[in-house]
Image: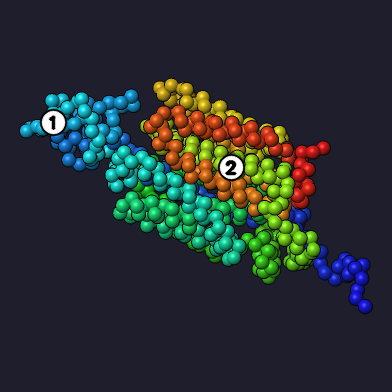
Amino acid sequence: MGASPETKENEVNDGSKPERVDLDDVLVNELGQFGPFQLRYMILVAIPIIMSAFMSEYIFSAAAIPHRCRVNECGEDSKLVDTFEPDWITNAIPETSSGLSSCSRFRPRNNIVNGSLDYCPATLFDQSVSVDCDAFVYARDNSVVYDFDLGCQEWLRVLAGTLNSVGTLLVLPITGYISDRFGRRVALVISVFNLALIGLIRAFSVNYNMYLALQILQTTLGAGTFSSAYVFAAELVGPKYRVLASATSSSMFAVGQVILGGVAWLIQPWRYLIMALHIPCFLIISYYWILSESIRWLLSKQRFMEARQILEKIARVNKKQISEKSMEGLLTPPLVTEKTIEANQRGLVSTIVKSPILLRRVCTTPIWWITTTFVYYGLSINSTSLSDTMYLNYILTCAIEIPGFYTAVFILDRIGRKPTLSGGFFFSAICNIAFVFIPADLNVLRLIVYLAGKFGISLVFTSLYLFTSELYPTEFRHTLLAFSSMIGRIGSITAPLTPVLMDYWHGIPSMMFGGMAIISGILVLTQPETLGTKMPDTLAEAEALGRK
C-alpha cells in the first residue's frame, strides 16, 4: 500500500530532512546584519559604483561651445582665433537677444580689398542680408564640437547623451543573462572591463560617427557596472540596514559624478579627460580574485560547497557562529510544490488584465519612473548651462543628491512612502517652475532654487525603488519592477535633448520638469500607503493594500 498523506507529512517533519531557512533570518539571528565583512564589501563595491558615473563624461566631452561664423574677409583662416569677439565683429555678424548669432552672418560684398584681424569695416558687408555660415570659429577647443566641427548642429551634438541612455536600456537583458548564468562577480568584472576598454578606444575617435558608435557600445556592454555592484552591496546586509545600503550605493554614484566634474575641471582636453577617467577602471579586474561570489546566487544555483565556505568566512570575519542546523537549512534545495507550479503556470499578462487594481498600478508606476529619470538626468545635464562656471555647477548639482538620498532614509519610515514621494515630486516641481521666472542676473538665487529642485528629485529616486516593490506581489515583483524601470529609461533617453529646447525659449526644459513632476506627484496619491505593512506575497494581499 502507498503511504498516506499524513505519513508523508510526518516524514518531512520528523527531522530526517532539515527545515529550509531564509538567509535574512540567519543574518539577523546569527551572522550579524552589518558586521566587518559587510562593511568591507560595501567599501570594495563603492569603487566600481563611483566608476560607473564616469559614463556621463559626454556632458563635458560633447559640451556645447560658443561659436560663430568664420569671417574670411577679415583675415580669419582657422577654427580657433585669439579673439572670439573682436571690435569689428558686429560689422560682420548680426546680434540677437542672446548675443551674437551663432549660425548666420552678413553677406559679403564683392570686394577687391579685404580687411584684417585688426581692422574690418562695415562697408565690406551687405548688412541688409543674412546668410548661413559656411565655416565656424569656436571660443574653446575642449569638446568634440570643435574637433569634429559641429557648429549649429545642436541636435547632432546632444545625440551623444541620448545614445548613452539607449545603451543603459539595451544592457539590461545582457547583464541579467550574464549575472544569472555566470554569477554576479563575473558580470561586474566584465562590465567594468568593457566600460574601461571601449571608453579608452573612444578617446581616439577620428570622427563623430565613431565617437557616437562607441558611446552606445560602451553603455550597452558596460552600463551593468552599477547594478552588478549594487547587488553585492545590498544582498549581504540584513533587512534593517537594506535601505541605508541602498542610499549609500546611490550616494557613491553621486560621489562619482562629483569626481567626474572635478577631473573634467582639471583636465579639459576631452581626449585626455576620457583617458584619465577610464584607465584606472582596469584595476577592477582584480575583483575577480578579491571578491567572493554572491552568496544568494550560489544558493539559488545550489552550489552548496562554495556557499558553505563563504558562510563560514562571514562568521569568522564577523566573529560570530552559525549553527549547523542553520547551515543545513540554508543548503537545502527548495521544495517544488503544487503551489509553486501553479504560480509559474499563471500568466502575468492575464493576471494583470483580470485585476483592475493591479492594472492601475502597472499603468501608474512607469510614469513615476519616466518622470524621475527625466528630471534627475535633465537637471544634471542642464546644470552646465546655468552660468560660465559649468564645472562647479555640475559638481554642486550632483553633490546635493547625497543629502537627498539620506533624507529619504530618515523620513520614509516616519511619515510614510506616499508623503515622501508626492512631497518630493511637488517640491521639485515648485523649484523648477520658480526657476524659470528668476532674473538671469540673480545667479546665486537661481543656483539655490535649481539645487533645491535636484534635492527633491533625489529624495524621490531613493524612495521610488522601495515603494514600487511594496505595491506588487512576490510572484510578479521582480518582473514588474524591472518593467517600470525599463519604461522609465524613456526619461533618461529624452533628457539629453532638453538643452536644445532652450534655443526656442529658455524656460521650456524647467517647465517640462515641473509639469511632469506635478503629474507624478498626483498619481502617487492614487496608490495605497505601504508603511507598516508586510510585502504582499499573493495577488489578494497586493489588492488588499490600503484597505482596513
Q: Which of the image's four quarters has the C terminus?
A: top right
The percent position of residue 78, horizontal first and vertical second, equals 20, 41
Specify whether residue 36 is in view: no
In the picture of the structure, the residue carrying the numbered disc 1 is 109
Q: Which residue is mark 2?
A: 369
> What SS does tag 2 mark?
helix
Q: Residue at x 49, y 36 (%)?
A: 379
Position of residue 352 measured from the top left corner of the image (x, y, whole percent)? 69, 49
Q: Residues within 10 Å of mark 1 (few under 14, many from 20)?
A: few
Q: Closer to the camera, 446 or 123?
A: 123
Tell me which residue sits at (29%, 47%) in the image: 148
* Image quarter of residue 248: top right
Measured Cα–Cα span from mark 2 to mark 1: 56 Å
- Residue extending farthest to the bottom is 1
Residue 504 vs residue 196, the one in the foreground: 504
What's the residue type where badge 2 is placed? Trp
Looking at the image, is mark 2 or mark 1 earlier in the sequence?
1
Residue extending furthest left? 112
Amino acid type indicated by mark 1 = Arg
* Residue in view at x 62 percent, y 33 percent: 521
> x, y percentage for residue 224?
53, 55
Q: Secondary structure at mark 1?
A: loop
Q: Nearer the viewer, mark 2 or mark 1?
A: 1
Q: Residues within 10 Å of mark 2 (few under 14, many from 20)?
A: many
> In the figure, 269 relative to 74: above or below?
below
